[in-house]
Amino acid sequence: MKKLVGLFSVISLGAMLAACNSNPEKTVYDHLEAGVEEESAYTENQSSLQEAEEQEQQWYEEVIELGMDEYDQIVSLTDQLISSVDQRRDFLAEEKNGIEAGYEEATKAEAEIESIENEEAKAHAQEVHEAIEQRYESYNSLHDLYAESLDLDQTLYELLAQEDLNVEELEDHIDQVNSKYDELKEATDQFNQQTDTYNQAKRAFYESADLNVTFD
């Protein structure tokens, strides 16, 4: 999976909010930033996924350079490749847990939006809610595509381990893998765009609500 952009973080001294009294704007803020914290597992897993992908690429290149007289090495490397796919499945599951937790926390803010009296701030808060939903939908599409790509990768490595490898079957499968990667790139770009939109909407809300927030 290509590296994805993350949610902006809020740097704070204390709570970074000038007012300590509870109000709808502050409650919305609290839920949104708690959602960022819940997504921390997702952010951490991005580097783990990328490292695993890079290692797999290296092993894959080694495999295709080997001849059938080095079959034992091929089997050893493909076993490592398949184990790496399993590890990426675990990383993906943890990532999804982080996204789910962040989404559930952030959407709690919706209940407070109608209580916001500042009409400009309310409008921006509604835009934030819409951006949350669109980003979550985008992530789910990306997640499903990545899961499909993992299955295709595993099948590819299993084909490479066959002693009676059918070259035509292998080439056809490689085409499927490459096609899925193209879909993944498009979905990743879409998710990154949705994340940028969400971050911009949050910033606009915080500013219109006069929350004394300092951004990275």
Image (spheres, helix red, strand yellow):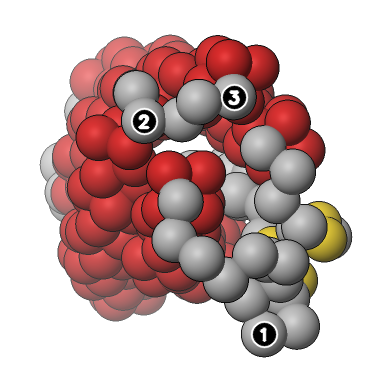
Give the quadrant of residue 145. Answer: top left
The residue that disc 2 covers is 115
Gap in Å between the C-alphas at discs 2 and 1?
25 Å
* Direction from residue 180 to residue 193 in the image, left or right: right
Label 3 secondary element: loop
Look at mark 1 in the image and give the residue it sits on. Answer: 14
- Label 3 vs 1, first from the N-terminus: 1
- How many C-alpha atoms fall within 10 Å of the one at disc 3: few (<14), some, or many (≥20)? few
Which image quadrant is residue 86 in? bottom left
Q: Residue at x 59, y 24 (%)?
A: 118
Where does residue 212 sit, x and y in percent of width and height? 77, 57
Q: In this view, does 115 lie above or below 187?
A: below
Question: Which amino acid type is marked by label 3?
Answer: Asn
Image spot of residue 6 (x, y percent): 61, 50
In this image, 161 relative to 194: left or right? Answer: left
Of residue 138 and residue 181, the one placed in the foreground of this image is 138
In contact (CB < 8 Å): disc 3 and disc 1 = no
Residue at image coords 75%, 83%: 13
- Out of 182 and 55, give the one closest to the viewer: 182
Q: What residue type is labelled 2?
A: Ser
Residue 198, above or below 76: above
Q: Using the numbered discs, state the Cα–Cα distance from disc 3 to disc 1 in whole angstroms.
A: 25 Å
Query: Of helix, strand and loop, which one carries label 1?
Result: loop
Q: What element carries label 2?
A: loop
Of badges 3 and 1, nearer the viewer stands 3
Q: Which is nearer the eye, 76 or 138?
A: 138
Is residue 107 shown above or below 29? above
Task: Note whether residue 128 is visible.
Answer: no
Q: Residues within 10 Å of mark 2 (few under 14, many from 20)?
A: few
Numbered mark located on residue 138 in the image: none
Q: Name the residue under label 3.
A: 118
